[in-house]
């Protein structure tokens, strides 16, 4: 009999720009374990990044970089033809910016998680995945763990394969507020629709439960989260309507599951 999955809650944060705000970062930061901080190419700027890192520190939240394709107009949720070496440089540029603010506040870099469409592109292409996973090694000196900066992505895809090949710690991610098709592909939308809290609770219980470790699909199927996965981080997007309430519901279920399994 398998144990319930150990879990954390993560959220994409700092996705405003200049005077514009997206999401309730202050409310969300009180609820989550991991913050994926936008690095300027789909959202954020130097002031927003600085404020978001300071907010994470005041709430004892671990910080990871959330780099994107260079697409402010499309919020990084439009695919782009890009070569592995270009994408590697694109990520180094963005992660380096966040690293400066982390050093300012004396914080380590916990992980790197791609944003939006490039998340899907790197999950499907092993060449692109190797390019972005390899960026974690450049910032190893900024990591909290001797193992280095982790990579957060989809289990059972090129994300996990590249991390295992390169010896990079892998954080398997699952989404509370997005759908999966019957082939297990994450359905990344440019604008996120609202999700009823009861639907979120059902999804979380299915993924973490003792007998399941499954992902529910739009067609009603239950698919395995992935091989060699004992821990998962559940994402709640800051721009999903009702994001704070969703994150609070997920956090309550995660805390209960971790406690019953003896993880805390």
Image (tube, rainbow, N blue to C red):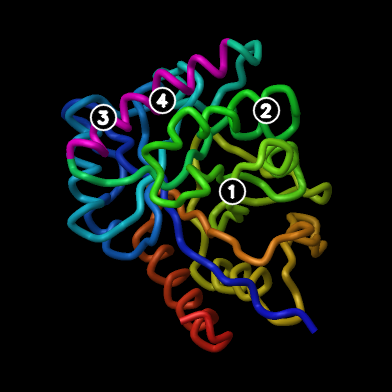
Q: Residue at x 59, y 70 (%)?
A: 204
Dot 3: element:
helix
- Please identify the quadrant where the N terminus is shown: bottom right
Dot 2: element:
helix
**Magenta run includes residue 88:** yes
State yes or no: discs 2 and 4 in contact (Cβ < 8 Å): no
State yes or no: discs 3 and 2 in contact (Cβ < 8 Å): no
Q: Residue at x 41, y 63 (%)?
A: 247
Determine which residue is flagged by label 1: 169
Q: Give the magenta-colored segment's residue range.
A: 86-104
Task: Please tell me whether mark 4 or mark 1 is closer to you in this view.
Answer: 1
State yes or no: discs 1 and 3 in contact (Cβ < 8 Å): no
Real-space Cα separation, disc 2 to disc 4, in angstroms: 22 Å
Determine which residue is flagged by label 2: 130
Which of the two residues, 140 or 179, is positioned nearer the viewer here? 140
Determine which residue is flagged by label 4: 42
Q: Residues within 10 Å of mark 3 (few under 14, many from 20)?
A: some
Residue 264 x/y as whole percent: 46, 81
Dot 4: element:
loop
Q: Residues within 10 Å of mark 1 (few under 14, many from 20)?
A: some
Q: Residue at x 76, y 79 (%)?
A: 2
Real-space Cα separation, disc 4 to disc 3, in angstroms: 19 Å
Task: Please tell me whether mark 2 or mark 4 is closer to you in this view.
Answer: 2
Dot 1: element:
loop
Q: Is residue 220 left or right of residue 144?
A: right
Determine which residue is flagged by label 3: 100
Real-space Cα separation, disc 4 to disc 1, in angstroms: 25 Å
Q: Residue at x 57, y 71 (%)?
A: 6
> Which tag, 2 or 1, sits closer to the chain's start?
2
Real-space Cα separation, disc 1 to disc 3, in angstroms: 22 Å
> Which tag, 3 or 2, sits closer to the chain's start?
3
């Amino acid at each position: 009999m398998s144990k319930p999955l150990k879990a954390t809650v993560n959220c994409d944060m700092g996705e405003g720009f200049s005077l514009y705000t997206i999401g309730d970062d202050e409310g969300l930061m009180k609820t989550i374990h991991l913050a994926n901080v936008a690095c300027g190419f789909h959202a954020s700027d130097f002031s927003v990044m600085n404020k978001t890192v300071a907010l994470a520190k005041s709430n004892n939240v671990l910080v990871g970089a959330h780099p994107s394709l260079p697409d402010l107009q499309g919020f990084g949720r439009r695919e782009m033809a890009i070569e592995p070496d270009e994408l590697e440089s694109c990520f180094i540029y963005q992660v380096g910016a966040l690293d400066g603010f982390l050093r300012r506040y004396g914080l380590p870099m916990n992980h790197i998680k791609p944003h939006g469409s490039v998340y899907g592109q790197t999950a499907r292409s092993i060449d692109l995945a190797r390019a972005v996973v390899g960026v974690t090694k450049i910032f190893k000196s900024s990591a909290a763990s001797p193992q280095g900066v982790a990579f957060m992505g989809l289990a059972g895809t090129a994300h996990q394969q590249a991390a295992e090949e390169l010896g990079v710690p892998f954080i398997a991610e699952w989404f509370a507020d997005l759908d999966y098709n019957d082939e297990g592909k994450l359905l990344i939308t440019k604008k996120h629709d609202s999700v009823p809290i009861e639907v979120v609770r059902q999804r979380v219980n299915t993924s973490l439960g003792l007998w399941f470790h499954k992902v529910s699909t739009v067609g009603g199927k239950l698919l395995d989260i992935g091989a060699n996965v004992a821990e998962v981080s559940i994402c709640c997007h800051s721009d999903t309507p009702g994001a704070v309430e969703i994150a609070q519901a997920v956090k309550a279920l995660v805390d209960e599951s971790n406690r019953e399994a003896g993880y805390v």
